[in-house]
Image (tube, helix red, strand yellow):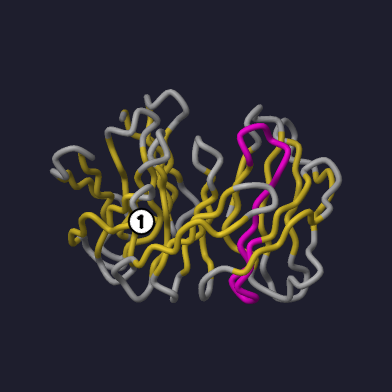
Amino acid sequence: SVAVSPDGATVYVATNDGTNDAILVLDAADGSEITRFTGPSWTNYAFGLDVSADGSLVYAASEDTDELMVFDSATGVVVDTVTTGYSPIDVKVASDGRVHVLSRFGGQVDVFSGEPLSLELSIPVTGNDLFGIAISPDGATAYVSNAGGSVSVVDTVAGTETDTFAVPSPTRGIAVSPDGSRVAVAAYTANQLITFDTDTLVTETTSVDSAYAPAYAPDGSYLYVARFAGALVDVFTA
């Protein structure tokens, strides 16, 4: 997993080879390693990453230990640790500061808030292999990809799943446009990128070999899609 600081100056990369698990802190300008963060109970599989809006905190989901760890970005010190659902695979911080953790095999989205973090909601989500989560710009809606072949729409305020629709399986990464009008989800063995209108849920399909991880440009003008194979990134006009 990769996350970028709000000012674009620092890149955080989770490594999970089972031996040297850490968050690498890289200089975005030249790619050099500045330092690395490790957690006291972090035995394996650091996966999802995100950064707070002010850049002061880095959130890391540890799939092996069922924890979310919060690092001070300046010191690398763990300042908070909370228990999550089973096998947390992704974490996203909403514009309102709430932290959303997706449990891959736990079938839920946990919503945390406050400092220190406190569990606000645990929202059941359809699927037995949840993989990615994207949050609308207003923080009120989460979109969850299920590797079994579906996308769930979740009201994170009411704490309910409001819609689910089928897409080719297995799905992988998911992203929402900066204006909240579009969501992109990758179906990598189907070699497809599926985008849908968040109001109508009308979908469009584009062929992308081994599509794996979509991401929108900050201004919404482009949609980038990383491939699982071939070390390529496709760029589309959004």
Write down the quadrant of residue 171 in the picture. Answer: bottom left
On whether residue 91 falls in the magenta region, the answer is no
Write down the quadrant of residue 202 in the picture. Answer: top left
Q: Nearer the viewer, residue 47 or 213?
A: 47
Specify start and end residues of the magenta stretch as a single range.
52-68
What type is the residue that disc 1 sits on? Gly
Packing grade of label 1 (10 A; few <14, some 14-19, many >=20) is some
State the residue at coordinates (30%, 58%): 160
Reading the image, the residue beneath label 1 is 159
Q: Compared with residue 55, is residue 41 higher up or lower down, i.e. above or below?
A: below
Left or right: 20 in relation to 46: right
Q: Estimate the x, y position of residue 7 in percent, counting from the top left.
A: 66, 27
Name the quadrant of the C terminus. Answer: top left
Q: Estimate the x, y position of residue 77 in percent, counting from the top left.
A: 84, 53
State the residue at coordinates (28%, 49%): 193
Q: Estimate the x, y position of residue 94 in percent, counting from the top left.
A: 49, 41
Identify the element where label 1 is drawn. loop
